[in-house]
Image: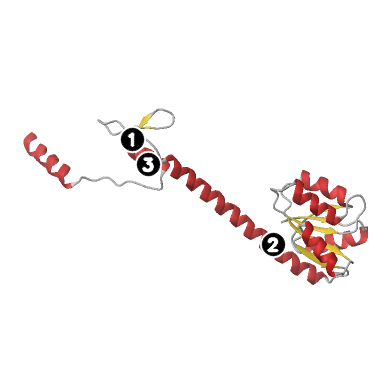
Amino acid sequence: MKVLLAEDEAVSRRLMEVHLDKWGFDVVGARDGAEAWVQLQQQPDVEMAVLDWMMPEVDGVDLIHRIRTELPGRSLYVIVCTARSGVEDLVTALDAGADDYLRKPFLQEELRARLRVGVRTVALERALRRRIADLDAALRHVRTLQGLLPICMQCKRIRNGEQVWERLESYLEEHADVEFSHGLCDECLTKTCATAREDA
């Protein structure tokens, strides 16, 4: 999973990059909030972000607010890191759109645990997006089966959306979750047998 790491203090950033890389994350580093914003726009596959609060140019909370307001369709799990420890600071960060809050200094195992929470959340969001896409596709198929279908009264073929006449079985197999097995009903079986006896 690709993670954006925005930290203006070079030693801290490098140390966190080493840990994230060791834990299997693909790390995208940024020296401040402005660079982080550029990276987010250039790399739409970033799914998590670890942002320092106090950074030059654009701080972490301002960056989160920009992400949530200017990239509303972007699914991004955001952890904000800061030495601030007041309850009002926690509320400010969460109100801006942070998903989690990590107080400095923190243990690497605490960071790892919070990243695991992010990974689970991102995985759930992915699954939800796939489910919604499947439901949308199913709904589109249902809609194609609604309304008036032109059908030939002689051969029973259906005229599709491209104005081409096709077999009823082909049309339904394409537009509905059905498959056909062929056979003869009792009436047709009787007629077929009678015709066969006459031809003999």
Q: In the drawing, does residue 77 fall left or right of residue 106? A: left
Q: Which residue is mark 2?
A: 119
Amino acid type at image mark 1: Arg
User: First in sequence: mark 1 or mark 2?
Assistant: 2
Label 2, residues with CA under 10 Å away: few <14, some 14-19, many ≥20: some
Q: Is residue 174 left or right of residue 51?
A: left
**In the picture shown, does residue 134 fall above or below 122?**
above
Residue at 79 percent of width and 67 percent of height = 111
Q: Which residue is mark 1?
A: 167
Measure how far apart labels 3 and 2 are at the Cα level.
41 Å
> Residue 31: horizontal and vertical position, in percent?
89, 52
Residue 26 appears at what percent x and percent y?
76, 55
Q: Residue at x 10, y 37 (%)?
A: 195
Of the image marks 1 and 3, the number of the one nearer the N terminus = 1
Q: Quadrant of the N terminus?
A: bottom right
Q: Label 1 vs label 2: CA separation?
A: 48 Å
Q: Position of residue 86 (x, y in %)?
A: 87, 69
Say what amino acid the circle numbered 2 marks. Answer: Val
Which quarter of the figure has residue 96?
Answer: bottom right
Residue at position x 75%, y 59% in the image:
25
Indicate the quadrant where residue 54 lies. Answer: bottom right
* First reached walking from the N terminus: tag 3 or tag 2: 2
Q: State the SS at label 2.
A: helix
Disc 1: CA contacts within 10 A as few (<14), some (14-19) or many (>=20) = some
The colour mode here is secondary structure
Quadrant in the picture for residue 23: bottom right
Which corner quadrant holds the C terminus?
A: top left
Rendered view: 142 above or below 86: above
